[in-house]
Image (cartoon, helix red, strand yellow):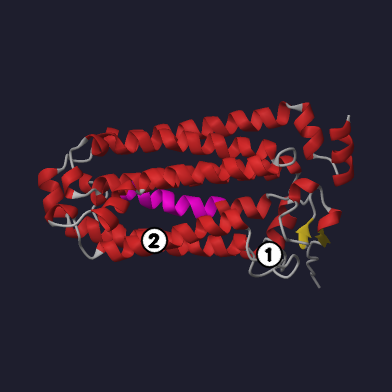
Amino acid sequence: MLTIKLPQIFRIHQVPRIFWEDGIISGYRHPKSSALDCILSSFQMNNETVNIWTHFLPTWYFLWRFLMLSYSLDFWHDTYSWPFLAYMWLICLYPFTSSCAHTFSTMSTHARHICYFLDYGALSLYSLGCAFTYGAYSMPDCWVNGPLHHYFVPVAAFNSFVCTSLSCYSRFLELECPPLSRILRTAAFVYPFIFDNIPLFYRIFFCFGEDCAWNDAIAGYFYHLFFALLTGFLFASHLPERLAPGRFDFIGHSHQLFHICAVVGTHFQLEAVLCDLHLRQEWLSTHAPASTFTHTFAILGTALLGNLVLIAVFTITLLRSSVTTTILQSTPSEVERHKDK
């Protein structure tokens, strides 16, 4: 009879320091797992299981929404829907990439960093996807055809490079300067979030009257912003596991919670963007410039290529740096000895 042996689970002191998570004491997978072990581990309870599934299952939900919407929106011929098409590709990409990163991050110390380089790149592109839809459908009426409207998407594409660069670089500082690493990584995602949501902040909090595009989408944007802020808080605070180390190793730690909040926030964002897309189509078709291939897919392709190049540069740097390699592959005691030299 065929039997499958599930991978062994370890405690924090049994794995290299680079794998440690704040407040997580047990449930660690082997730091040199095979690809098969990584896949099998997603079907056993460890401290990454819920992280994997909270983004893998939503990937299929967003793909299903994408398929259903393709029957009602003419993505091939209607240029008005092109920014939304780019957005849908990217909201399917980021949870799938995150799920894969959490699945295969224990193949080796180098694999861990490379997996998260790709994860950060996908999140950076998601921020660009938000800018595509906000620039096309969510700008306040009084800002349409203004300077911010014209440069909104190109600046967001540049921001994706900044986000990927800062977040990838932060991984090189994890052992030697953890506070700076966390600050850089948090700033890498807060900055594009604030920029992307400038139109929403203005519509919700500062704009009242006929030129504010106040419609049913506002409630969805409000919920999206609420869950996005909650996501950021959980990511930065590492609560609740910091209050009770070991209590939330398998279920309930901050990474799982912010995965859930991120997906729920994206759901509300999707519904709000769809509402704006339909309710404002007549007005925007008359007053706003039509979407072009260059302004949508050429920028998307450039951003995708540029982020892949950045990830390749950081990967090569990681593999070639003998000092970094020594630190990343060390056990906790060896790391401390290395620092003392």
**Over which residues does the magenta segment extend?**
84-97
Q: Which of 199 and 9 is in front in this view?
A: 199
Label of residue 241 in the image: 1
Is residue 294 shown left or right of residue 49?
left
Residues at marks 1 and 2, CA–CA distance in whole angstroms = 25 Å
Tell whether position 89 is magenta: yes
Disc 2 packing (10 Å; few <14; some 14–19; many ≥20): many
Per the image, the residue denoted by label 2 is 224
Relative to 107, residue 147 above or below: above
- Residue 224 in percent (x, y) is at 39, 61
Helix or strand or loop: what does disc 1 sit on?
loop
Disc 1 packing (10 Å; few <14; some 14–19; many ≥20): many
User: Can residue 56 be seen at all in this image of the molecule?
Assistant: no
Helix or strand or loop: what does disc 2 sit on?
helix
Label of residue 197 in the image: none
Q: Which amino acid does label 2 sit on?
A: His
Question: Which residue sits furthest left?
Answer: 286
Instruction: Compare marks 1 and 2 and give the one earlier in the sequence.
Output: 2
Q: What residue type is labelled 1?
A: Glu
Q: Nearer the viewer, residue 176 or 207?
A: 207
